[in-house]
Image: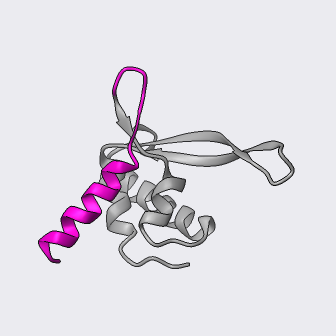
Amino acid sequence: MKTELIHSLTDTFEGHALQTETGIEYWLARDLQQLLGYGEWRNFNTAISKAKTACEVSGHPATDHFVGVNKMVDLGSGSQREIEDHSPQGKGLCHRNHHLQRPRT
């Protein structure tokens, strides 16, 4: 991979990082989904499930590295609804990257 592309992808990834009130960086899977080329949540969620399994198989509890979260999204009607999301952290980011090499829409 060319150096320029690596820097561009890193900047894009870092640009989507969120921060807690105490300054800890985190990402939400639904934000990373598009960056990694997944057009549909169900396909991306399958890759996340595989990454969770890889954590467990390697001796790392998935619950330590994938935090289940819910967030509110705006609907066209002006109302909101809650949707499922994940916040991969630490080993979860490593395993997620391994299992997300081939995006599927």
Task: Answer above or below: position of 29 versus 33.
Answer: above
Q: What residue do we see at 44% from left, 58% from top? A: 53
Q: Camera-side residue: 42 or 80? A: 80
Q: Residue furthest right?
A: 77
11 drawn magenta: yes
Name which quarter of the figure residue 17 lies in: top left
> How is the structure coloured here?
one colour
Q: Identify the residue at horizontal 46%, vertical 72% (top origin).
A: 37
* Residue at screen point 78% across, 44% down: 81
Q: Quadrant of residue 6?
A: bottom left
- 2 or 54: which is nearer to us? 2
Assess whether residue 9 is covered by the magenta stretch.
Answer: yes
Q: With 101 as the anchor, is 82 left or right in this view?
A: right
Quadrant placement of the C terminus: bottom right
Residue 1 or residue 53, whichever sits in front? 1
Q: Position of residue 84 (x, y in %)?
A: 65, 48
Q: Residue furthest top?
A: 22
Q: Which residues are magenta?
A: 1-23
Q: Nearer the viewer, residue 38 or 6?
A: 6
Q: Where residue 55 sits: x, y (%)?
A: 36, 52
User: Residue 22: where, in percent of width, then height?
Assistant: 37, 20
Q: Residue at x 47, y 44 (%)?
A: 87
Looking at the image, is 52 positioned above or below residue 21? below
Say which quadrant the N terminus sits in. bottom left
**In the rendered image, the vertical position of residue 49 relative to residue 3, given as above or below:** above
